[in-house]
Amino acid sequence: MKIPTGGQFRELDLFTIEHEPVASIDLMERASRAIADEILRKWSSPEQRIFVFAGPGGNGGDGLAVARMLAQAGRIVTAYLFNVKGQLNPDCECNRDRLREMEEATLVEITSELVFPELTSDDLVIDALFGTGLSKPLSGGFALVTKRLNQSRATVVSIDIPSGLMCEDNTYNDTSSIIRADVTLTLQTPKLSFLYAENERFVGDFTVLDIGLSREGLDSMKHFLWMTEPAEVQAILRPRSRFAHKGTMGHALMVTGQRGMMGAAILSARAALRAGAGKITQQLPSESLNIMQTAVPEAITQIDIDADIITSAIDASHYQAMAIGPGLGTNTYTAAALHSYMRQQACPMVIDADALNILAENPEWLGDIPAESILTPHPAELDRLVGHCANSFERMNRARNLAIARCVFIVVKGHYTQLCTPKGDVLFNPTGNAGMATAGSGDVLTGIITGLLAQGYLPAEAAQLGVYLHGLAGDLAAEELGEDSLIASDLINYLPKAFKKLKVKY
């Protein structure tokens, strides 16, 4: 699913109006009907007071239409329309006139000064001040209104986007003047800024409402931002041949773990096997052999000459995939082994954790990363590679630029994990939950992606499918165990259920 920019949303509106065809006022009515129905579904008490704060543009027009529909449904509605310049969007003006004709609702048109209502925790506020067309921070009277609403105890629902929040880049925004919604009812697709952690306090929980914007118009847009959909990963997932055996399902090399950090090695090894790899070989410090063979008896072992760390690279030419990094450490000898593996370019590589930290300490080695390798940093690891980022928008752009420049895939881990591709696309993953914020979760992801690579999935396929399965396993685990008690090994245990669920058509 494409994630259009704010400008492209306006283009999509116009395309729909022209090609459906549909009048803009009727398209507004359609969107407002979807919003009103969702509000009536979520907040059903007829005694609850509803206050609509509407701006002079299209978003305000939506708010006024929603106010009319809620009043028609028997709700207690007061709408405040801000018309301080005497210039309303034509559709907003039309909906103002329609609302004026109703006895069931109260309309207060603000032309100078607002007498702010006394809001309580029982009230519902609908924020329809500004939508996706906003291009600068809110100031003056509108900034004061947003601050007053944020100080109230009322439940706040934003239409399409919280007023004051930009669709993409909020680097230079005034965050004190952005509505802090409890719920955002957004139209057709999520906005990019909704997918960033720092904007959760403004967006709250968001629901996407389909208002029938042109599919043809959406498909024709040139864009690089996407949300992965179940059908896409289902199309990637391959059936196993009835004649498959361990030799045909791929052999992965796992270069992970130093003394005292074998948990990361064990988790990634088990995950690779659960993801379907036919065999794995685990390169280990010599003192860790018994730990690995006890914890993962299915693993083949390759012992390093050192007791505590990995010091040298072995010939990786007969492996179908390799992972390096989890629990590895950053010793000078270990760093040299990583560099040697990269220069071999023997098989697809997944580079994670301490391997990324080594690269950050040796940026001149970035050019030696084999093409189409998969790097799996969390935000702090990425910042070490690309420099400190002020926010998630900047971090996404820097990761995207690095993926293009080095012809690699970069998986930026987090809620809505981002996959940046060498072609410049950014794919956001919809699966996963806060329970996965636990030590070892990233090691499991490394193992899953490596196990898929070993079976012959292309790097683009292994990264997208692996991220989705990882999150889906977390969601299935959370359903039964709850988020609070989730640990990394639960993700491995629920991976078989994730595969089975993915094979069932949604």
Image (tube, rainbow, N blue to C red):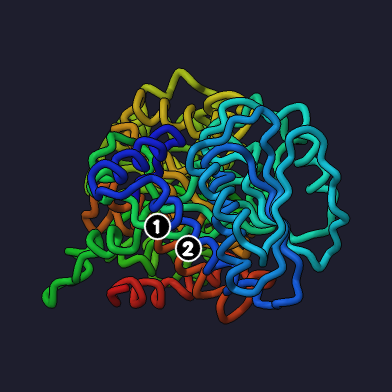
Q: Residue furthest left?
A: 243
Tell me: residue 139, above or below residue 421.
above
Q: How many marks?
A: 2
Q: Position of residue 351 (x, y in %)?
A: 43, 41
Q: Position of residue 267 (x, y in %)?
A: 51, 62
- Report the amino acid beneath label 2: Ala
Mark yes or no: residue 194 visible.
no
Badge 2: residue crowd in 10 Å (few <14, some 14–19, many ≥20): some
Q: Residue at position x 66%, y 64% from top?
A: 103
Of callouts 2 and 1, the N-terminal one: 2
Q: Are marks 2 and 1 in contact (CB under 8 Å)?
A: yes
Badge 1: residue crowd in 10 Å (few <14, some 14–19, many ≥20): some
The picture quadrant where one finds residue 441 is: bottom right
Q: Residue furthest bottom?
A: 480
Between 200 and 189, the residue placed more toward the observer is 189
Between 204 and 287, the residue placed more toward the observer is 204
Q: Position of residue 16 (x, y in %)?
A: 30, 45
Q: Secondary structure at mark 1?
A: loop
Q: Which residue is mark 2?
A: 34
Tell me: residue 295, above or below residue 229.
below
The picture quadrant where one finds residue 488 is: bottom right
Q: Taking 166 as reference, is 496 left or right? A: left
Q: Residue at position x 66%, y 42% from top?
A: 198
Q: Which mark is residue 57?
A: none
Q: Which mark is residue 211?
A: 1
Q: Residue at position x 67%, y 67% from top?
A: 104
Mark yes or no: residue 105 visible.
yes
User: Could you tell me which quadrant the C terminus lies in?
Assistant: bottom left
- Report the amino acid beneath label 1: Ile
Between 445 and 2, the residue placed more toward the observer is 2
